[in-house]
Image (cartoon, grey):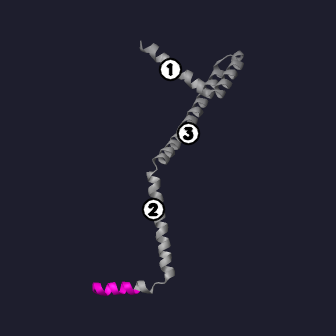
Amino acid sequence: MSDTSKQKDKKTEEQTREPEEIRADIEQTRGELGDTAAAVAEKADVKAQASAKVDEVKQQAAGKAQEAKDKAKEATDQAAAKAKEVAPESAGPTIEKAQRFVNEKPLVVIGVALVAVVVLRRVLSR
């Protein structure tokens, strides 16, 4: 088939299309164009992307904080159990009181433990 006969077939095909089909094609094209424009606008919105990244980092930090809290509680529970085994019976109420404090304020205990480690390292390095 020659190029001119292909063009004639194409013109004939377009001429036989119903107006409803043409309108449907136009609506579909408009929808696709709208989706494309929205995607471009979303990529260009730096403020929204930064906000989404901040939210993601906040969630990660919260997860890590909870994980550290859980580890600290587990470590203090183990230490309390060992202390109960080794300590005399008269120390029981004091150990329980310390354990309650640790359960209520684990971040304070973590901070104190970190300070103690730093001080101990400095003393031992001299």
Which residue is disc 3 drawn over? 63
Residue 121 at what x, y percent from top left?
46, 17
Residue at image coords 63%, 28%? 77
Looking at the rendered image, the quarter that the C terminus falls into is: top left
Residue type at mark 1 is Val
Above or below: residue 28 compared with residue 99: below
Residue 103, picture quadrant: top right
Looking at the rendered image, the quarter that the N terminus falls into is: bottom left
User: Which sits earlier in the primary sequence, circle 3 or circle 2?
Assistant: 2
Evaluate if marks 1 and 3 touch, with contact meaning CB atoms under 8 Å apart: no
Which residue is disc 2 drawn over? 36
Residue 13 at what x, y percent from top left?
41, 85
Give the distance between the C-alpha atoms of the residues marked 1 and 2, in whole angstroms. Answer: 57 Å
Q: Secondary structure at mark 3?
A: helix
Residue 100, picture quadrant: top right
Residue type at mark 3 is Gly
Residue at image coords 44%, 57%? 40
Which residue is disc 1 drawn over? 117
